[in-house]
Amino acid sequence: MGDRSYLAIATYMLYYLFMKYKPLKLRNISNDIQRELKNPEFAKIYNEELIRLELAHRLAKTREKAHLSQTMVAKRMGVSPQLVSRIEAGNLNLTIGTIFRYAKSVGSELSFSLKPVKAH
């Protein structure tokens, strides 16, 4: 399974565990996600969480490629290692400033892109 699949599964599980309290059927997860994405409320939450988790994953991968520990990044950012851990876990609503400081501390620069939303 690719990294994006794990993010989708994690998002799906979070949604059901904390929002709907429904049991998961892991063998049908892709079908369940596709069916639930027709629900605008689910789709909004799912897409926001997927972006948050994908960003967190990319930040962690960038740090690892730079051969830096979370403690080293924390020192460079002037924050606690616990905060870096929470950033990389996708547990925070990050500001652009925090993302910028993180990128700088791992020797990277930010690059953003926007793409048009597909019409339904």
Image (cartoon, helix red, strand yellow):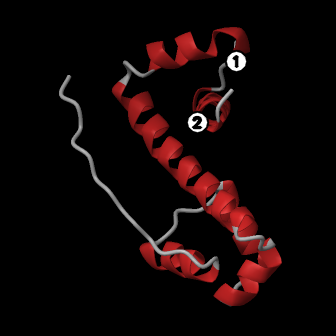
Task: Determine the residue positioned at 68% across, 60% down.
Answer: 60
Disc 1 is placed on an element classified as: loop
Q: Nearer the viewer, residue 88 or 2?
A: 2
Q: Amino acid at mark 2?
A: Arg
- In the image, residue 81 lies at what x, y percent? 79, 76
Task: Determine the residue positioned at 77% across, 70% down.
Answer: 67
Q: Quadrant of the N terminus?
A: top right
Disc 2 is placed on an element classified as: helix
- In the image, residue 75 lies at what x, y percent? 75, 88
Give the Cα separation between the discs numbered 1 and 2.
Answer: 19 Å
Q: Which residue is mark 1?
A: 24
Q: Could you tell whether 86 is left or right of 96 in the image?
A: right
Mark 1 vs mark 2, foreground winner is 2
Q: Which residue is mark 2?
A: 4
Task: Determine the residue positioned at 54% across, 74% down.
Answer: 108
The answer to which image quadrant residue 43 occupies is top left
Q: Could you tell whether 92 is left or right of 27 in the image?
A: left
- In the image, residue 79 lies at what x, y percent? 70, 85
The answer to which image quadrant residue 91 occupies is bottom right
Q: Is residue 58 above or below residue 20?
A: below
Q: Amino acid at mark 1?
A: Leu
Which mark sits nearer the N-terminus, 1 or 2?
2
